[in-house]
Amino acid sequence: MAVSERQLKKAIDTLKESGVRITPQRHAVLEYLLNAMVHPTADDIYKALEGKFPNMSVATVYNNLRVLREIGLVRELTYGDSSSRFDCNTTDHYHIICESCGKIVDFHYPSLDEVEALAEQVTGFEVSHHRMEVYGKCKECQQVDTKKH
């Protein structure tokens, strides 16, 4: 069984345990996210699946993403005013974002637990989580810039 097949089976088991109905659309959204090498928007998912589900609306995609997020199978990434993006990798990791094309890539680095502990100590806050974003230009956009000059 391939990794994504195992992940899909595990995710479906989680849905069943949570009492969530597994509709064909919900299954398709989940499968798309698990196989996506990018962090798609709801519109990206809708466009990818509309051929298979011609009666499915963007609202259906958003509703399914909300359910998947509430159960903890999907993480919603919000960056400024742009559309939310969705990530099936819910483990602790960070993102690097291209300032030109908006591509988001995962990268793993040891968790910054010390920073959280220091923030709590200095501010008196009870820290629930953190996120780190790194910005730059992806290789493809760098090559486009090089060709322009």
Image (cartoon, grey):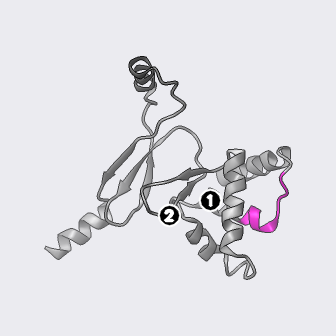
The amino acid pointed to by label 1 is Leu
Residue 25: x and y in percent read: 76, 68
Relative to the observer, which residue lies in front, 136 or 79?
79
Q: In which quarter of the image is residue 148?
A: bottom left
Task: Tell me the SS state at disc 2.
Answer: loop
Q: In which quarter of the image is residue 58?
A: bottom right
Q: Are marks 2 and 1 in contact (CB under 8 Å)?
A: no
Left or right of 116, for residue 70: right
25 drawn magenta: yes
**Which residue is the site of mark 2?**
83
Q: Residue at x 44, y 55 (%)?
A: 79
Q: Earlier in the sequence, mark 2 or mark 1?
A: 1
Residue 138: x and y in percent read: 32, 59
Residue 120 appears in the rendering: yes
Relative to the observer, which residue lies in front, 6 or 105?
105
Magenta stretch, residue numbers: 20-28
84 drawn magenta: no
The amino acid pointed to by label 2 is Ser
Residue 137, placed above or below residue 7 = below
**Which residue is the site of mark 1?**
33
Quadrant into which the C terminus falls = bottom left
Relative to the observer, which residue lies in front, 79 or 53?
79
Task: Tell me the SS state at disc 1.
Answer: helix
Q: Which residue is drawn at 49% across and 54% down?
A: 78
Q: Quadrant of residue 128?
A: top right
Residue 13, placed above or below residue 51 = above
Check residue 64 in the rendering and tell me which mark sits there, or answer none. none
Q: Distance between the residues labelled 2 and 1?
A: 16 Å
The furthest residue to the front: 124
Left or right of 143, for residue 53: right
Of labels 2 and 1, the one closer to you:
2
Q: Residue at x 41, y 24 (%)?
A: 119
